[in-house]
Amino acid sequence: MARPRGAPFRKGRIDSQKPLTNNPSNAPQRAPISSLPLPPPPSIEVPKDTPRFEELRAKNLVNPTILDTLTHDLHFNHMMPVQAATLEYLLQGKDCLAQAKTGTGKTLAFLLPAVNTILKNRTRCLSTLIICPTRELALQIATEAKKLLQRCPQCKVACAIGGTNKNAEAKAILNGCDILVATPGRLLDHLSEEEIHRKLGSLQILVLDEADRMLDMGFLPDIKKVLRYLPNLPRQSMLFSATIDDQVKNVAHLFLNTGYEHISTIPEGEANTHERVQQFLVTTPSMIQHAPAMVAVIESELATAKLFKAIVFAPTAAHVDFYAHILTAVGTLPKVSVLHSRMSQTKRTRTTEEFRQATNAICVATDVIARGMDFPGVTHVFQVGLPSDKESYIHRLGRTARADAQGRGILVLSQVEKGFLYQLKNIKIQDYPSTLQYGIEDIEPALADLDGKPRIYQAWLGYYKTHMKSLRWSATELVREANQFALQGLDCPDVPALEKSTIGKMGLKGVPGLVIAPNAPGSNDARRRGGGEGRGQGRFSKK
Ligand SMILES: Nc1ncnc2c1ncn2[C@@H]1O[C@H](COP(=O)(O)OP(=O)(O)OP(=O)(O)O)[C@@H](O)[C@H]1O
């Protein structure tokens, strides 16, 4: 049963073994987070049956300086399986499409051959172009490349990502860099400048990280445009991802030389999530309980965890702000931060860095950090509400249990969203083992000072509109659910009004239950037609 309406926000009270009662005095006592001893981060255990990097020295395949960096500075001794499977092949300059589970060292698998080529035939021109989907990932890859090149200060790494000073980026490229790590949009901006375009004139290596994302319908047109800018010279191309779909296989030939290898370290039919990640499902009666269920399951996990560094994934930036507000209001949880694309790049980069350094923390985020991000020591991944697709589920989950560490993944879905589980065949997800008690009343005090409710409502509507088919909802049902979410889940006094143009863009024109913003052209028309679309007319308000 939920906390009585209006009672104070519950604090740290879930016993993962026992159901809760309403009485806060029954809540198990937990030491404040700040007083918990902090064990060291999980150690990285690389399988010992893979070859050692030193074997590449004996075979004279890698520049000795790079090998010294790997083994002495970075303390990498044994290869990870994907490195063992691809390195010798890639070090010979061949092309490949490579697939390996999340967090298993794909970055080094493409960086090592790239860096080796740079040192072998340094042209003083841009030699390697690495394209990836997000700014954070580009910055991370650039950092990894710099680590690998730490004994070669003459080699430079630059980034071209959106949201930053374009002139400063252009200057770094024009001053001479060996590796450029870029996101597609900003890269195209730069390439339209003749001088920068010329810098790619002797490109030797092209890498598409998160290849399935880079080659999906969203990014493919831009990537094809980039391809047109590249010199018509022999080059080595490498495509890497944890998930490779048919679309990638269909278009891979546009990027890879004929005869390329498709190397996968995931056996046919095996799930591409790790056995090391225990995966659980929390089912809520409806979507309005997503937020209170999230609080309850986080508290439940926290009660038994020695360390708690969690990412909470939410469908939209507005959901992220909403969930972060609710989690912050609990008061007893580790520090909560947010990451989404509506933030300034400076803030995004600072938050990413702080979360990277943290040992006990919660980061609420959109898919902006779902792929590739290597935050050390993430113990839990929570996914609240429908993930956009199976790949998103897998990549988000892959933020924990990296490089052989352990982790837990918890998916919170409402009854109506559970059809999504059919997409996750081969992936073992158990029902959450403890009884959780929660109700919308639990979060009501926090809802009272929640800003931007209309924005959250609109984002909810926009997100679930794209999933109507899988939810088997008509437009009317979608709006009915959205309105219930606004009135009960967000505690709005009335259904928030939407601009007529927004309704049109969503393809929801004329759907009953929507409220058109007052003064917007059309709202009066709608009333004249007897559509009942005015704000707070009773039909769509609480009272
Ligand atoms: N041979 C190695 N020995 C020890 N640690 C390694 C080795 N190779 C990579 N790592 C570490 O493993 C972690 C995960 O690597 P990486 O980020 O490259 O994974 P990934 O496969 O690219 O993941 P994703 O699919 O999420 O993009 C990193 O912290 C990296 O430094």
Image: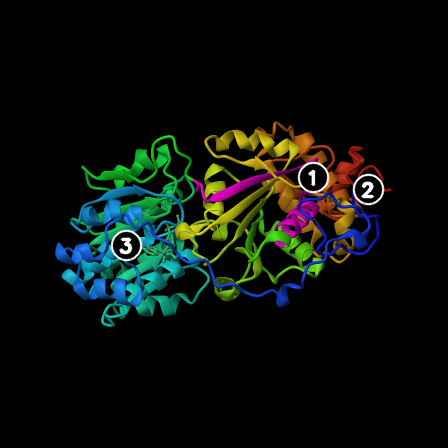
Specify few, some or many for label 1: CA neighbours under 10 Å numbering under 14, 14-19, or 20 or more: many
Q: Which residues are magenta?
A: 273-302
Residue in the foreground of this view, choosing between 231 and 533:
231
Q: Secondary structure at mark 1?
A: helix
What amino acid is found at the position of numbered circle 2 in the picture? Ser
What amino acid is found at the position of numbered circle 3 in the picture? His
Provide the residue designation for mark 3.
Answer: 78
Disc 1 + disc 3, Cβ < 8 Å: no
Residue 481 lies within the magenta run: no
Instruction: Name the N-terminal-most of marks 2 and 3.
Output: 3
Q: CA distance from mark 1 to mark 3?
A: 52 Å
97 relative to 440 in the view: left or right: left
* Residue visible at 39% across and 56% down in the picture: 44
Provide the residue designation for mark 1.
Answer: 482
Q: Is mark 3 within 8 Å of ligand 1?
A: yes
Provide the residue designation for mark 2.
Answer: 541
* Residue visible at 64% across and 40% down in the picture: 503
Instruction: Name the N-terminal-most of marks 2 and 1.
Output: 1
